[in-house]
Amino acid sequence: SNELRFSSPRDNRLRFTGGLFAQSFEHRIEQRYLVDDLTTYYWVTGWPDTLWLTEQTRSDDSYAAFGELYYDITDKLTATAGIRLFRTDNRLKGFFGFSGNYSGLSGESQCFPDAEDPSSWRSYRGAPCINLNKSTDESGNTPKFNLAYKFDEDRLVYLTYSEGFRPGGVNRRSSYPGPGETEQFPPYKADYLTNYEAGWKTTWANGAVRFNGAFFIEEWDDFQYSYLGQNGLTNVKNAGQARITGVEAYVDWAATDQWRISAGATWL
């Protein structure tokens, strides 16, 4: 994970923060379902007593450019505008399933040559072959706007509009659609959360008490819904929309030099 960030002096009336971000993540997955004294008919090739084998590599790459502008409209009122431009790449490659004698829509019956290295298609990190090689990529942006009014050094209120996202990915399950049919388990897309928020941040009693809180409405679009399918494989689909409304508050009190008392509540 790498980030390059630039910031202008904080005492300027117009301020800027921006930069670049890149992250590469790899997860090597091995799951082996062992059954003692399992008859060889059911062995995954090369894996004794193994009824089911998962031997896969998941790769996630993320790139972003971001920036925020802050402008003091008055000594008490500050406006913020920002945006994050992103691109994500997700890939899942390897083997999953039963032996060639016992497999249906997973396992050795679904093996295919590796397009990147056809000579090695009969093996993948010790697994019999490759029967999964899927990828998906997306790009987009998430903006943010904020107005904050500071009554004094200890108390302010704010309004925020912001968006966030969760990257999409691929499903292991293949659907083998016929001519003119839609793939049943295609890659799932990013889901987005749009947040509308009004809140306050305050301190009292010469800094001994902190009292913060917010009201919010969140609109969730194309949310990723997970459910179990055949062979216990998790499938993920974009399942529509949802709304979250609520209020939260938090109090932190340094009652004495020895005692600190905190309380919080959220209604959703």
Image (cartoon, rainbow, N blue to C red):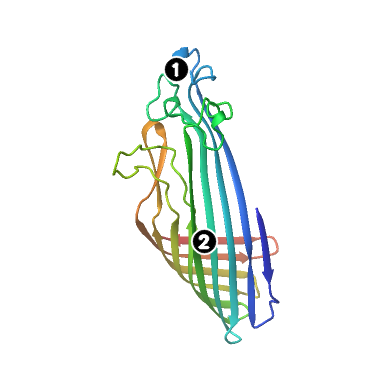
SS class of the residue under badge 2?
A: strand
Instruction: Give the amino acid type for the residue marked by disc 1 in the picture.
Output: Tyr
Residue sitting at x 39%, y 56%: 222
How far apart in space, not on screen, are marks 2 and 1 (Cα)?
Answer: 55 Å
Where residue 217 sits in the image (x, y, percent)? 41, 66
Q: What's the mark number on residue 151? A: none
Q: What's the mark number on residue 264? A: 2
Task: Specify few, some or many for label 1: CA neighbours under 10 Å numbering under 14, 14-19, or 20 or more.
Answer: some
Residue sitting at x 50%, y 68%: 143
Where residue 263 sits in the image (x, y, percent)? 54, 61
Q: Nearer the viewer, mark 2 or mark 1?
A: 1
Task: Specify few, some or many for label 2: CA neighbours under 10 Å numbering under 14, 14-19, or 20 or more.
Answer: few
For residue 149, which quarter of the picture?
bottom right
Instruction: Give the amino acid type for the residue marked by disc 2 in the picture.
Output: Gly
Q: What's the mark number on residue 42? A: 1
Quick one: label 2 or label 1, which is nearer the N terminus? 1
Query: Badges 2 and 1: C-beta atoms under 8 Å apart?
Result: no
**Looking at the figure, which quarter contains the C terminus?**
bottom left
Q: Is residue 98 above or below residue 8?
A: above
